Amino acid sequence: MSTFNLDAVFRPRRIAVVPASDEENSPGGTIFRNLVAWGFRGAVYPINEARETVFGVEAYPDLLTIPRPIDLAILCGDPERLVSDLELAVKKAVRGALLICSDFWTRVASAGDLISRLKALGEAHGLRLLGPNSLGFIRPRLRLNVSVLPGRLPAGGLAFLSDSATLAAAVFDWAVDKNVGFSFFVSLGAKVDIDLADMIDFLGLDPATRAIVVYLEGLRSGRKFMSAARAFARAKPIMVVKGGRFAERPASAQTPIGALITEDRVYEAAFKRAGVIQVEEVLDLFHLAESLAKQPRPRGPRLAIITNARGPATLATDALIKYQGLLASFSEETVKNLARVVPAEVIGNPLDLLSGASPERYRLAISTCLQDKAVDGVLVIHAPVLQISAEDVAWAIVKASKAQPQKPVFASLMGKARVAEGRRILKDQNIPSFVTPVEAVKSFVYMHRYDRNLRLLYETPGTLLEDFCPLREKVREVVLTAARQGRYRLNFSESLKILEAYQIETLDYQVVFSRQEAVAAARRIGFPVVLKVNSIDILHKRASGAVALYLFEPEQVARAFEEILSNVEKRAPCARIEGVIVQKMIRWLGFDLALGARKSETFGSVILFGAGGELIHSLRHCAVGLPPLNQTLARRLMEEAAIYEDLSRDDTLDLRLLEKTLVRLSHLIIDFPEIKELHVNPLFFCEAGVYALDARIIIEEFSSLFPERPKGVFCPAHLSLCPYPDHFVFGTRLKDGRKVRIRPIRPEDEPLMAELFRTFSEETIRFRFLESKLFMPHEELIHYCQIDYDRELALVAEIKEDRRLRIIGVVRLVRYPDEQSAEMAVVVGDPWQGKGLGQALCRFMIQVARDLGLKRIFMEIMPANTRMMALARKLKFKMMEADEDIVRMVLDLVPEGGP
């Protein structure tokens, strides 16, 4: 339900505590006291059937006897009362409920069944539920402490969300002690309803929240999380510590590649794709949040370390290498300038200023390093010495940083009492200060990862597959035939046919059943050849002696055929054998790679790329990514695998061919949810091209094959990211007869959108964006083009003019988090206005909104935009409210044929 009714939970005016009591340590009594003590501005009603008052406040026997409407009911009773209490809340028309019930999973015998009953009850009546097993939540600025946590939590800009109640309690105590401020503090509990994605949606629109920090143990819906996180990661940093990271390899995996795609690796890939920062420890969350609030993000991983103590600098260097940062290499000019500050023989990185370094020496060294283009950030380490004041060193750091504010500066003043004033100065002057250099290094590296993830969101991919026409029906036929026969492991031939249908190249091969056929096939294909067993039961052919390489003569082929069958009979006697494969043997120099896919329990289908051959079993040599992939995302996935360094050094290789292969595989995985697991090893990459030499595909055991996509659903159920919705493509004509193609926008449309913007007059810009804009920055254009189709849809009108395509108009529909309403806006380039295009775009989009099940569409129009006002009325929009600047209009949607 996303943010529907969340205002009732987190901004309540009237709260009921069920049951409330005078007992000092009872949950109901603690929450009631907190609400009163914190000065909650609304009304609080204690429920206690045995008492007339609670803490001197009139008590009520049950919810139904309260004379006023209730926004939030806090249910603190025993687990067996939860359903009956919730049923009373439904009768009272309560919109939200907090379910405390500590130790829920151990106190309730059939916890799963109870969760299902609570969930069904809430969903049926639009009643939002937080918990159970929750400590509650706190909003310091609203003086709202709806929790069992005692003490005062300062107000601030951080929102903290925790899956673990005990961890939340520990962080609360730490924050009170350290005076760390929060905008929101929430213990999510068992997440029967309100989950992390709902909270991100809610907090993304909260002006008091500047960053979101999360302790996460797991997600129910990866797709819901990705949609929420991607929507707000650009505006507000989302930082996550993931618990349970070191789970075993997935038990359901049936191929070596599938075994490499662990849930932990899938979570990491999802966080990167969403622009979320993953850190190691809970304290890292708060260090990073402080650093992001005070300093610019580093544009690269290269750190300069400046110190007066060699030991701490060595620890910082070790940490930098461990977390995959880089020591900056100083330019010749920087070395020359540093020679004026320190002796030439000590110049290096780390830069040792020596123990007696003056504040001025610190300032000059920091300034010099910040000027170096090869430096992305500076860490200053100061160990206390008798003759140097830590306060003076702190001011030197501040002066150098403020003189060149484009790069981040971090400080570690080591010690306690003697550097306390220096740390206070740094804090007041927005320089992140850390007790240890390792903490500072981790914040620098995490900031760079965040910047890299965000830049990936802003990159414009090239058009990679202009003539890509996959043979979907051919794949459908192969899968359907196997499924009808009750086979869910496709054989070698079937697997390669599927890859070939998506233009992933293979080598000539033939399946044979006798030594004579093997020799004949080898002669036809051309020597040298490779022989390998054709069996759906044998994955590790070399271990079974079921493969023979580099066969140059007919005699070798005949002998290898017999040896393979003999080896299989001894080592895999139960395996089903469907002949032997004779395949062309590659003689080019190249790389054995691996490509694969598997369905994750949380995030659906994911893709793996890495080193193949024997290296396939090494986690370090592979990388995991989420489809859909475009050119940019394919390249980033390649770069994350250790093998990429070797590939990029080989000038004979065309890496674009590998990108294309990854993108084609992505299309295959998107188009066929029937694919449960896919294994290509080796994928041979050489100067001549990319070839799938061996493959295995496992399909789902479906009761009904190839289900049709439900009307109006953008994202297939097996994906966590919405692919391009190519089913929303329409054709129309302008009034002058010219053909127009209307289609969803793509990330690679950014250059065409920039060109469209240049056709706008000042009036068109003002009417569309409700403000004047001289130009549209690249980042903003990318934001318009690179969208989450589950939340937002833009349809562009495309014509062919002067032998090339150009975009001449756009209509955009942005869905509200309540999932019932949306806002629509349309703009047409000035040369094409008055030709009926704006009306056509709006009508197509209104039909899409109906398909999505939306109830209403809003438009905001400037009063001076008379043509748009007339079009809105023609489309049956009605005026909702108006002032001198904006007219807000609404269209109530009803199903076609409805009343």
Image (cartoon, grey):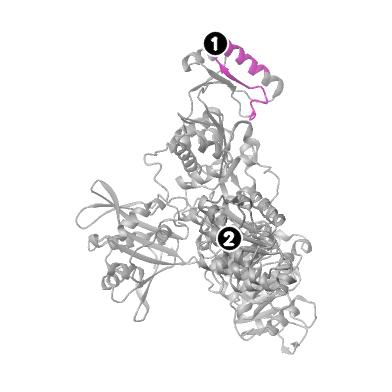
| Residue 301: assigned label | none
Cα distance in 3D space between marks 1 and 2: 72 Å
Front in this rendered view, residue 73 or 776: 776
Query: Magenta includes 565?
Result: yes
What's the magenta region?
Answer: 537-566
Q: Where is residue 101 in the image (x, y as percent from the top left)?
A: 74, 69
Relative to residue 635, is residue 350 depicted above or below? below
Q: Quadrant of the N terminus?
A: bottom right
Residue drawn 45% across and 28% down?
A: 688
Kind of residue at disc 2: Ala
634 relative to 891 in the view: left or right: right
Front in this rendered view, residue 356 or 858: 356
Q: Name the residue carrying label 2.
A: 365
Earlier-in-chain disc, 1 versus 2: 2
- Residue 695 is at least partly visible in this image: yes
Q: Name the residue carrying label 1.
A: 554
